[in-house]
Structures are given as C-alpha cells and as structure tokens.
Amino acid sequence: MQRQFDDLLLGSIELFCLAAELGSFTLAATAASVTPAAVSRSVARLEKRLDVRLFVRTTRQIRLTDAGRRYFEQCRDALNRLAEAEREATGQQTTPKGVLRISMPTPYGHYRMLPLLAEFRKRYPDVTVEAHLSNRNIDFADEGFDLAIRGRAPRDSGLIARKLEDAELVVVASPAYLKRAGVPKTIEDLLAHECIQFEMPSTGRPVPWLFMQNGEPLEITTQGGYGTSGDALAGIPLACHGAGLFQIYRFTVEEELRAGTLTEVLRDYGGCSRPFILLYPHGRHLSSRVRAFVDFVVEKLGTR
C-alpha cells in the first residue's frame, strides 16, 4: 500500500483536531506541549494541502469554517478509531486514576448524582471526584471541567451529549397554604395564587412553568412575591412552610409528598418534563477516568 500520510501530516491533523476541540491555538499548544506557532503552521500546512480554509481567525478567537467542521468531525472519528484499534491490539487496560471534575445542577446533584459517587469510587478508588453544584453554564476549557450535567444540549459540536432522563415536573404546596388560599383547579387559577419563582442564571428571568393542556405542552409565566436564584431547590422549604405553590422535579419532593408535608396540585395538567443531559468533550485524549464515569452514569441513570 502506498503511503498517503507521513508522520508530519498525521501530527498536523492531531494538532488541528486539538485546536478545534479547545477553540484556541494557544490552548492546543499547551495541551500538546508545543508552541502556538507550531499549531498555526500545522493548520496552514493542512489548508495548503486541502486548498480550503479550516478556521476563521480573529485577534480574539478562532472558529471552524463549514469545510473545517466537516473535516474535523471525520478526522476526530478516524483518530479515535486508531486509538481504539491500538488499545485492542495491545490489550492495554488503563486503570482510571486522577482528579475528575464534574459540574452539575443542584437538584440533579443532590438527588441523583451525589448518592452514586461512593459506589463509583468503590469501583475506581484511584479517582478523586470534585463535584461542583451550580445551575450556571460552565466553560470546559477555561474552567477545567471533565464533564457537566445540564438541562439542554449545547450547539457546540465539540461536546458529546448523552441524555440521562426526562424528569417529571409537579406543582406542590403545603396543606396549610392550600387551606388558606384554596386548591387551584385550572391553570387560570394560578393568577390568584402565590407562585414561588426561580431565576435562571443564564437568562436572569424566572423559569416559566410547564403544563400539558389538551395533549399539548403549555408554557406559563407565573407571578409571586417570593423569588429565588442560584439553587433551584430553594423553593422547596418555602413551599413546605406555606409560602405558596412551587413547580419542581418530582424526584426532589417524593419524600415530602409521602409524608404529607407537601401536596401535589393540578394533576390534570401534569405530564411535562425537562431533560438532564451528560456532556463531555470529544477528544482522542479522553481519559480512562472520564470513560469509566460516563459508562457508570449511563448504567445507573441512563434508562430512567
């Protein structure tokens, strides 16, 4: 077979993919222990060979062109297949170890993810887990996270998205509040009630409430004298102590519903959910600890 790719060209492809994954020549150079100029020369070498522009460059950032994105996706897959072939051929089994940094929203962290971490570390004791609970979006490259759990898949094609579950939403209130203010029977009744608000960091606006009406999802803007931000769970103790109605994931209030501390209302309009998605970067250098955690989480939560 005649050679089509020499070592220099393969190295250029690797540096190009790293720059595309990280969105920066400088970060790619740091990750590969080379200079930014070496990354720039590698990309220029590929552009000359292909006779296409792979990146749009400005003084502050780089962005893949349409041709560059298509080339990146195919090169990334090819490099991953080569790495897998090498591991299979050598029988290499890398023991997961090192620090694993995970960003997760507060509801999913407290009620789904944190209870599983002890079991994960029992399987992989050489992995140290740093769990960061926050409802804000993070930047993988700038903040050094390995994985994140979020409510929606980003447009960034440099991230792999694996859905973990569709979490059902419920509207709850304390028996004392419902005795005082009455039980809402219809969505229109919400206008006469205190609806506890949660403000999303990404928008600065209260999260709309979701319902099903005549088989169709319906988004409602509610009003109330209590506003929370930062932690989506903050509305639960407010609701338990009679502050008003609150819409939250069922899995976060199952204990309160069983105990009677909270009561579910508007069941006829229930059935809506929001997804939770596991996100992690594409990459030929995806560590064994990240692979192990992804497999573990999908095993435990991916069928809900």
Image (cartoon, rainbow, N blue to C red):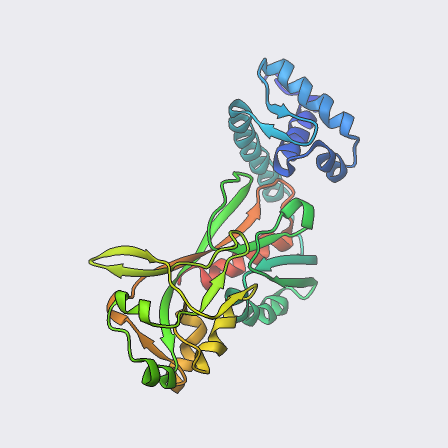
Residue drawn where x is 57% and y is 42% of the image: 282
Question: Residue 35 occupies which quadrant of the picture?
Answer: top right
Relative to 245, 100 lies left or right: right
Q: Closer to the camera, 46 or 109?
A: 109
Q: Position of residue 5 (x, y in %)?
A: 64, 20
Relative to 32, 239 lies left or right: left
Residue 280 in the image: above or below residue 158: below
Residue 211 in the image: above or below residue 235: above
> As drawn, which residue projects farthest toward the left?
214
Q: Closer to the camera, 258 or 43?
A: 258
Q: Position of residue 128 (x, y in %)?
A: 69, 63
Q: Closer to the camera, 104 or 227?
A: 227
Q: Position of residue 271 (x, y in %)?
A: 30, 63
Q: Closer to the camera, 193 or 34?
A: 193
Quadrant housing the C terminus:
bottom left
Q: Is residue 107 visible?
A: yes
Q: Is residue 112 visible?
A: no
Residue drawn where x is 32% and y is 85% of the image: 179
Q: Position of residue 92 (x, y in %)?
A: 65, 48
Relative to 179, 51 lies left or right: right
Residue drawn where x is 62% and y is 14% of the image: 49
Tally of numbered tags: 0
Question: Residue 1 occupies which quadrant of the picture?
Answer: top right
